[in-house]
Amino acid sequence: MNDPTALRDRWLQAIAAATDPAALAELDSRLFGPKGEVLDFVRSVTTLPKEERPAFGKAANAIKQEVEQALAARREAFGKQTLAKELAASDFDPTEPGPRLPRGALHPITIVQNELIDLFTSMGFQWQDGPEVESEYYNFDALNIPQDHPARESQDTFWLSDGNLLRTHTSPVQVRTMQRLTKQGFHPPLKVVVPGRCFRSETVDKTHEHTFYQMEGLVVDRHVSTANLIHTMKTCLRVILERDVQVRLRPGFFPFVEPGFELDVNCPFCKGAGCSVCKQSGWIEILPCGMVHPNVLRQGGIDPEQFTGFAFGMGLQRVVMLRYGIDDIRQFMGGDLRFLQQFPEVAR
Ligand code: DAH
């Protein structure tokens, strides 16, 4: 057997003599690889008589550690040398900030949704969420939508095999919110907005999408009137379309409001003179709304004799299209960067 001290000296010398990182790596595998010399040496304890083993084992492990440390120290020294060389050879400035990578931007629907939420919360509304997978009860029954209403058919609504459905509008959150609050003992006033994604079994074209965004609004209090509704809607449209607006109300039928309205805004493209966007009428249909039906208030646990309310359901894509002059709804889900990069507001 070789003399341990001689072996150790030979290994340490070899480490000191390695001239570059590659030579050191080779030495490392020669000493510590699967059949490495150092490991063989440590394992050779098994060939010794029993009484010699403890002393040898102790010494061998100490040598192994020493050689390992010498290797590590040499590796570190090489690393420092390489870095110093690289730094000296280039004009690299470690204090300079990194390159500016292109940052993502918010989707135009998100931009408008955020602005609307800011606006409504500044008017005292709370932001409410609801599930995209909804029950038939909340999506239809609780909203006074009759059993035989065509919206319940499978050609209009995505039904799931468990009897639930993908919500076709954000209105179900009206009753969900009222129930949650009244069960906790709260009473109106109540002011909420509910932005969210909705789904309908639509054939996609320039003006129809199967996946779309709405913002629902609900106000319940004593003596809430149509005048409150008009004022709130006008404020909202003025801020979001960034100009003074004129609105008009036409009757519209939705089972969960009575009376129900279609709120139109004067066409921003032709200023009311008539153009292809407004189909020569000077008006654009933008906001279905109305006074909350007593049956809906009752479903929410609110007494319609004491309280009244208004509600609206804004199609967000439509508002975004009007605001930016976008003429094809398919752009929103298309993922085309040339479209998306036109809305420069960076992600917050
Ligand atoms: N939920 C209706 C829809 O998607 C829109 C709507 C109409 C919402 C009238 C309302 C409302 O809150 O009062 O077609």
Image: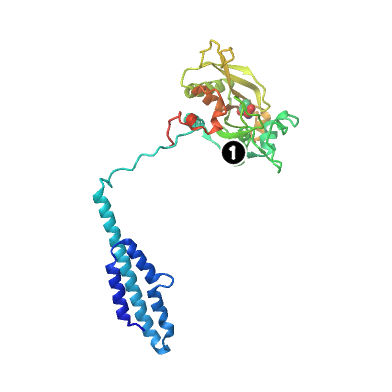
Q: Amino acid at mark 1?
A: Gly
Left or right? Give the position of 177 relative to 244.
right
Left or right? Give the position of 224 relative to 26.
right
Outermost residue to the left:
88
Examine the rendered structure and indicate whether residue 190 appears above or below residue 60: above
Question: Where does residue 257 sit, x and y in percent of width and height?
Answer: 65, 26
Q: Residue at x 36, y 67 (%)?
A: 28
Question: Where does residue 292 sit, x and y in percent of width and height?
Answer: 63, 27
Can I make out residue 111 in this image? Answer: no
Outermost residue to the top:
273
Outermost residue to the right:
148
Left or right? Give the position of 298 relative to 114.
right
Rendered image quadrant of residue 31 = bottom left
Can I make out residue 78 in this image? Answer: yes
Report the residue marked by disc 1. Answer: 130
Q: Residues within 10 Å of mark 1 (few under 14, many from 20)?
A: some
**Quadrant assignment for ligand 1:** top right
Examine the rendered structure and indicate whether residue 255 appears above or below residue 85: above
Judging from the image, what secondary structure is the residue with disc 1 in? loop
Examine the rendered structure and indicate whether residue 287 appears above or below residue 7: above
Numbered marks: total? 1
Q: Residue at x 41, y 86 (%)?
A: 48
- Residue nearest the observer in this picture, 177 or 248: 248
- Residue nearest the observer in this picture, 267 or 34: 34
Quadrant showing the C terminus = top left
Question: Where does residue 329 sit, x and y in percent of width and height?
Answer: 57, 27
- Residue nearest the observer in this picture, 284 or 345: 345
Question: Where does residue 260 sit, x and y in percent of width and height?
Answer: 64, 22
